Amino acid sequence: MKALDRKLMRDLWQMRSQAFTIALVVASGIGSFIALLSTYDSLQWSRQSYYENARFAQVFADVKRAPRPVERQIVELPGVSAVETTVVQDVTLDIPGVAEPVIGRMIGLESSRQPSLNRLFLRQGRLPEDGKRNEALVSEGFSKARGLKPGDHIAALLNGKREELEIVGIVLSPEYIFASRGGEIPDDKGFGVFWMERERLASAFDMEGAFNRVSLTLAPGASEATVIDALDHLLEPYGSLSAYGRKDQNSHRILSQEIDQQKTMATVFPTIFLGVAAFLLNVVLARQVATQRDQIAALKALGYSDFAIAAHYLKLVLAIVFAGIVLGFAIGAWMGYEMTAMYTLFFHFPHLTYRIQPWIALVATGISLAAAVGAALGTVRSILSLAPAEAMRPPAPTRYRRMLLERFGLAHLLSPQARMVIRTLERRLLRTLLTTFGIACSVAIIVSGTFWRDSVNYLIDVQFYMADRGDVNVMFVNPVARSALNEIGRLPGVLSTEEMRSVPVRLRAGHHSYRTAVSGYPPDAQLRQLLDTDLHRVPLPPDGILLSQRLAERLAVKPGDQLIVESLEATRAKREAVVAGVVNDLVGLSAYMDITALNRLMSEGESISAVALTLDPTQAKAFYARLKEMPLVATVSIKEELLRSFRETNARFLLFFTAIVTAFAAAIAVGVVYNSARIALAERAWELASLRVLGFTRNEVSGLLLGELAIEIALAIPLGLWLGYLLSVLIVSMMTAETITFPVVITSSTYVYAALVILAAGVVSSLIVRNRVDRLDLVAVLKTRE
Amino acid sequence: MTFLPRSLNFQNSEILTIFEYKKSMHMKPSPLTVFVARGLTKTYHMGEVEVPALRALDIEIYQGEFVVLLGPSGSGKSTLLNILGGLDTPTSGEAFWRDHNLATSDERALTAYRRDHVGFVFQFYNLISSLTVRENVALVTEIAPQPMTPEEALKRVGLEHRMDHFPSQLSGGEQQRVAIARAIAKRPDVLLCDEPTGALDYETGKVVLEVIARINQELGTTAVVITHNASISGMADRVMRMADGHIASVETNPHKLTPAELSW
């Protein structure tokens, strides 16, 4: 081995603890980059391959009742490739020991065979046998949440008649990757999807020889909009609610939204992370190489060429960075796999397909290498440009000057040690700033990775406690007379009720349009309140329509503008309405009206479609039991149940994400703090040893070194908290989620948490360095000035 | 040594190059002269202040001689040595080592010059602390064209028994002898020593000087030694006194002393 390579090995071994912390910084950057991007890519890929394998439909339509021969007419529409029709009905399930109503979506399965579109993936058991009328398949999410397995029985109220179904198989469907009754919150406990013999389902709901659900795929090159128009036209006589494409399909919409969010996370977060890691790598390595200034000069004097010297330090840096890259790959792959796996808590895919695309690994490696090589070459070059004779001598005593404090005549307040600390910081201002900034970046990363918990809590608080104040929402199958309100109000345990009318609509303004629902509330509504950005109540105007801020933006309208409101109910009423104002919904893109005005607009009498109510929890069982007997009730959503499900799934995900981000940021903080201290120690060993010789105690000498660090950390924490806030605002503003706005709410406990993590990293680093100071070999240090 | 000016720098404009070349032919040292410098000036810029280190200095050094450069701190000794050793370039003036124009050579040519012809010894030894004594010498023998073995070089400085020690395990004098072994292992044409005994005590300093004197005699290596210790001048062929950035006087020693005969 060449002498120079031997030096490399020994230097690496000598600085192994520093090398390890630098490698950790690289590993953190690469790890998060690979993890988040590969999770995004894997989700996207899983969805795509699942959709292809299962032949997921592209256009969907619900009708009241259409005779089966219409199916042929649909196939013949230009642009249509394949068509599948079936019967779909939501029913109430009766599960022993479960008080609250559970909804089952019953889907007809023709002759017990796989549908041609939206094919089922059989996880367990078998398909129902032809002719066995009580056999059914259940969705995996529900079967897991309720502990169902093949051979179990479940009772369903089919059109008011109790029927016993035997579960023979557990399946997954591309239509229900995300299962909920239509909301944003996964609801695997309260909502199950079942497939049973179509004939049996049809006969129970008077749908024999008919269908109420169409799915179809498009011919290559066909326009979705054209097909939807043609389909709407064809199905209008059969009570169509207007066909829609995948983007309005609930499961697809939520999944896509999540993938889009993941994409933002995967691009913004790792870019910042890797950027910070690269920056720190650059600073730390540059300082590391700079400590070898005399050796570089000696090599040069001995006749080594600049190229050979640069190559030597490049090897040193690359060895460290490669260790970091390898570690980063391992961490990234593990974390990516875990995160992808966590998505299966609320997204049900047949296979968890996790992969790391080569380009992801290559980009991560490339950025780290570029940062490292840049650091090494930049520093080596600046040292090489010094005349070697000059570089070889111990650096001339730094030119100190009276510090700011002294010039203000306040120096007498400080001890000589404190003066040394502050003068050093002032003298090496750029270095102080870089170190401080590096630590601040770690703080910022922790804040921006942890505030999601605060944001989600705030969102829940505003949306579910300040805006929606009821405990239970009861929705009817069809709009009913207002008298139903009194009927619900008489149920046991009901404390207060409030009516609501919801009309599915398409809103149009110019060439913009959006499919949503207009909700009509009484003007003095207590259980549902509309809020502005300051959380003040927005009163419902007697006329006109209020829009969610994001919906108004999407439709490019402002208060005073005209909107076309197309009802998607059977009446197909088309009306004009004036935008009266905007409200600050955090979730969903909705429209609101005074219920009287809405009924007037729809030319209806006093009809209502849902009731919000508050409930005495002690009588909940009796209430749910009576509610299950009411045939007009389509679905019931229970706030506590929804929130529990939300917290169970989301909290776990957030906790994992927060823990990982914190670990990465702490690694970065340790990398900066520890390396700063070690390099400062290397540079000042002579001075510190001299002080020890003069009679300073170990504490006093460590105090000089660690005092600098303490000041840097003290400056970095407030700066980092502020940067963390800015970073959070940036990330949120890049989240393009259509139906949800994450508020940038950061509680003081998050700030405290971030500060404490960094303090802990600082203390650990300081203790290690302190240990080094204690072992300072006074004689050796003074003998050879290096 | 070829007669072709292989290390001459032709980077400047062609007219200037021809001019320089002619001048260099005119100034080419006689076979016995290894270093020639004329009008050598070096000015350092320290912020807005200009600090002249060399002022129009002229010097000639002959093949195989032992030169001691004496002078107080700040007289420009180190600057001159660094320029002669190809570690630094002058602000203006001419400096030649044989046919190598040191003043106009680029970094690549200077590196080759140092590697092939110059051995340095510094006041603070500048050994690589992570390499053993043998490896420190090997650092040079690996890149020099016709080196002696590290073992031979270390034998010449009397350290063959400490070859596998690290610098931190040696005394200052031993470290300086390693530095000398490292400098001579390449069989340099010149040995440039900057305060080689500056950090050493009397006895150790003498041992180091003896080593340098022996190398100078046995290998015929031209040696230039900087010191502010006038007693050392007794062992020189010629003593040059520097003051204020130029050579103030040159004396030839009629009776060279051995280092053992020196005292200070």
Image (tube, grey):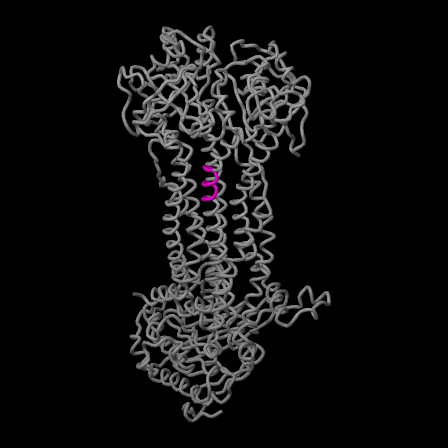
Dividing the picture into quadrants, the one containing residue A430 is bottom right
- Please tell me which residue is depicted at 43% across the width and 41% down the height of the picture: A36
User: Is A468 rendered above or below residue B110?
Assistant: above
Numbered marks: total? 0
Q: Is residue B165 above or below residue A540?
A: below
Relative vertical location of residue A233 with respect to residue B205 in this rendering, above or below: above
Q: Is residue A195 left or right of residue A580?
A: left
The answer to whether residue A471 of the structure is visible from this angle is yes
Q: Position of residue A352 (x, y in %)?
A: 35, 35
Residue shown at 28%/27% (left/top)? A125
Query: Residue A691: x and y, percent?
Result: 55, 76
Relative depth, front residue between B130 and A62? A62
Left or right: residue A92 versus residue A535 is left
Front-lying residue, B123 or A131: A131
Residue B102 position within the rendered picture, expressed as x and y whole percent measured from the top left = 45, 68
Question: Which span of residues is magenta-colored?
Answer: A648-656
Left or right of B57? Residue A534 is: right
